[in-house]
Image: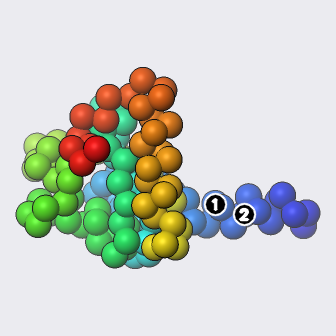
Amino acid sequence: MGFFSSLLKSVAQVAGSATLKGAYLDKKAPNMPGVYKVFYQGQLMKVGKASDGLRKRFSDYYRGRSGGTAGLKYITEENRDSIRVSWLVCPTSKTRALEEKWYDVAKDNGEELPWSDRR
């Protein structure tokens, strides 16, 4: 196996996407730190980080837990099953920088990010 094939295989193991429900209830998202994107009706709504674990963050979103997590107020029982998420696992020490990069790239590409209240 060549270097690039090995690299692609390792990336495929740490990146993923699913419905919000699948990421949480079907445990498709790992309970590891990382960054994520939230999509609703095909539109990028939010970029975020989950230092305490991606599945935990998606669980909070899906179950509607309050607690100051940005974007949570936009996810309701009516729309939560229509939400998709994608993620990339990375060390906690890298989540903030990668979140900022994804956010800046999205804004540069004309994305509105209406659920990203923080920035």
Contact (Cβ within 8 Å) of mark 1 with mark 2:
yes
The image shows residue 9 at horizontal and vertical percentages of 72, 63
Decide: is 60 above or below 18.
Answer: below
Residue at 28% over, 57% down: 21
Where residue 91 sits: x, y (%)? 52, 73
Secondary structure, mark 2, is helix
Judging depth in this view, the residue of 110 and 41 nearest the camera is 110
Instruction: Reply above or below: 13 against 52.
Output: above
What number is the disc on residue 106? none
Relative to residue 115, is residue 54 drawn left or right?
Answer: right
Q: Which mark is residue 12?
A: 1
Residue beneath the point at 90% across and 67% down: 1
Please report the residue visible at 42 percent of the width from the left and 31 percent of the height from the top. 107
Provide residue 79's location: percent of width, then percent of height: 17, 42
Which amino acid does the dot numbered 1 rest on? Ala
Disc 2 marks which residue? 9
The amino acid type, in three-letter code, at marker 2 is: Lys
> Of 66 and 98, which appears nearest the observer?
98
Q: In whole angstroms, how far apart are the C-alphas of marks 1 and 2?
A: 5 Å
> Is residue 63 found left or right of 119 in the rendered image?
left
User: Local crowd at mark 1 within 10 Å, few (<14), some, or many (≥20)?
Assistant: few
**Does residue 85 show up?**
no
Q: Residues within 10 Å of mark 2 (few under 14, many from 20)?
A: few
Question: In the displayed structure, would residue 112 be above or below residue 116?
Answer: above
